[in-house]
Image: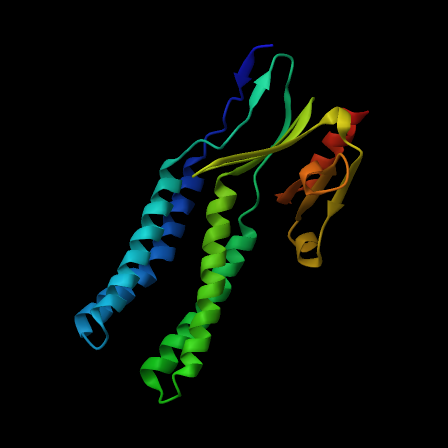
Amino acid sequence: MAAQVVARNPVSTPERIVRFLSTFVVATPFLAGGLITLVRGDAPIWAAAVLIAVAALLGSTGLYMTLVVIQPSPRLVDGESVFVVRSPTMKPAYARLTISIPFLITAWYLSEFTFSPYVYPFAAMLVGLFFFFSGAYRYWINQRTAYYVTNRRVVRIYEFLWLHTTEIPVSRIVSISESRGFFEMLTGRGSVIVASGIGARQTVRLSDIDDPGEVADALRSTIE
């Protein structure tokens, strides 16, 4: 049977604006820190170069994400139709980026305006950077991840530096379950786990999606 490509959903203009602003917020602190360090001259020049390089990496990656207006999609065979399309919500990524801000501000304040031992601002900076980069990483991954439920299969597809697709035919599905933590229930999101057997290779997890109950119901209706 001939293969066809799903009509890819373009990213809306408001979403592109949000992506651009997120890129600006993520890259600006490192660029500003690098320039300030370079101008003040109170630290090795390599430290300023590292900060500017990190800002360039974050900015270029974020700019690419802003310009890419098509979400990844699988190839369909004749007779296959799409029931549900979902992408991971950005709320966990935004939460990590927000949590990192107080730690980074604390590290800056302790190092600039107090005589505290360097271990305190260093520890605060490490915690802040952990949340910051984990949030940025998750933000980028989620932008290039999509979930599809068709009348024939469940597909998780990731497409950025590489392409990775995981799918389970509807005829082989043996269980459909929903997973929601406390905060996920409050924010109306969760995960749907589809399994055709035991083991990671026989499981597709649709993580951090809005209204997971709708996706689970669509899967159950296909099985029926």
Location of the C terminus by quadrant is: top right
Residue 95 percent across, percent down from the top left = 53, 58
Q: At 23% from the left edge and 69% from the top edge, which residue is drawn?
A: 36
Q: Quadrant of residue 170?
A: top right
Q: Is residue 137 visible?
A: yes
Query: Viewer-proximal residue, 182 or 125?
Result: 125
Residue 33 percent across, percent down from the top left = 29, 67
Residue 48 percent across, percent down from the top left = 25, 66
- Chosen colour scheme: rainbow
- Left or right: residue 54 versus residue 200 is left
- Left or right: residue 70 versus residue 156 is left
Residue 8 percent across, percent down from the top left = 50, 26
Location of the N terminus by quadrant is: top right
Q: At 64% from the left edge and 19% from the top edge, which residue is drawn?
A: 81
Q: Quadrant of residue 119?
A: bottom left
Query: Relative to residue 140, is residue 4 depicted above or below?
Result: above
Q: At 79% from the left edge and 26% from the top edge, which residue is drawn?
A: 223
Q: At 76% from the left edge and 28% from the top edge, which residue is drawn?
A: 172
Q: Is residue 102 visible?
A: no
Query: Relative to residue 197, is residue 109 depicted above or below?
Result: below
Q: Tell how many labels.
A: 0
Query: Viewer-proximal residue, 162 or 213?
Result: 162
Query: Relative to residue 101, is residue 82 depicted above or below?
Result: above
Query: Residue extending furthest top?
Result: 1
- Left or right: residue 5 versus residue 211 is left
